[in-house]
Image (spheres, rainbow, N blue to C red):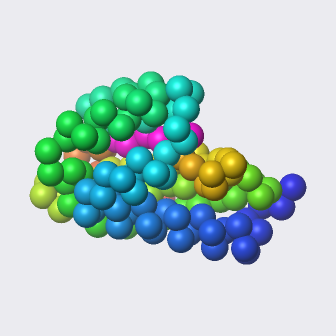
Amino acid sequence: MIVNDPDVLAELTALVDAYETALMSNDVAALDGAFWNAPHTVRLGVAENLWSFDEIAAFRLGRAGGSPPRTRLRTQITTFGADFAVANVEFRRDDTGKIGRQSQTWIRTEDGWKVASAHVSLMQGGADQRLASQEEKR
């Protein structure tokens, strides 16, 4: 198994970037298109637990205005072979300054790369928490 094959990594990087663009513009069709349309798909959010593609799609339709604006601080993508990858994003919410984390498990399906599992959470303590954790590492 090759970890971070350059071609596969480039594919996933483009997909993660496209997902971020869709998220910030509330492009529901593109967001739904990024997820695996299966009952096994899971998205655990800041205030919701969604246990199938149908629940995820219904959540997106019911969320007025889409995701709060955010700024990505760090993105780490790791591919394992040609058909499996994990993407992690650290972001700052533009409205509150809180630091958040997003993880996505991507799988290659007959319909292309899809998110099979996702998690989004906010850290307690906002931006100061990130700075504090960085200082502890030094």
Q: Nearer the viewer, residue 85 or 112?
A: 112
Examine the structure image and report whether residue 103 is included in the region drawn in magenta. no
Decide if residue 116 is on the left or right side of residue 58: right
Asked if 37 appears above or below 21 in the picture, the reply is above
Asked if 38 appears above or below 22 in the picture, the reply is above
What is the quadrant of residue 92 in the picture?
Answer: bottom left
Give me the residue at 71% from left, 67% from top: 8
Q: Position of residue 129 (x, y in %)?
A: 29, 51
Q: Taken as a whole, is the magenta stretch helix, strand or loop?
A: strand
Decide if residue 121 is on the left or right side of residue 137: left
- Image quarter where the N terminus lies is bottom right
Give me the residue at 42% from left, 60% from top: 19
The residue at the far right in this view is 1
Range shown magenta: 116-121
Examine the structure image and report whether residue 117 is included in the region drawn in magenta. yes
Asked if 66 appears above or below 14 in the picture, the reply is above
Number of marks drawn: 0
Q: Position of residue 105 (x, y in %)?
A: 58, 45
Residue 130: tell me if it is visible. Answer: no
Give me the residue at 36% from left, 53% from top: 29
Asked if 104 appears above or below 22 in the picture, the reply is above
Decide if residue 77 is on the left or right side of residue 30: right
Q: Position of residue 115 (x, y in %)?
A: 54, 46
Q: Position of residue 27 (x, y in %)?
A: 30, 58
Decide if residue 41 is on the left or right side of residue 98: right
Q: Nearer the viewer, residue 125 or 91?
A: 91
Give me the residue at 47% from left, 41% from top: 118
Residue 105: tell me if it is visible. Answer: yes
Q: Nearer the viewer, residue 10 or 22?
A: 22
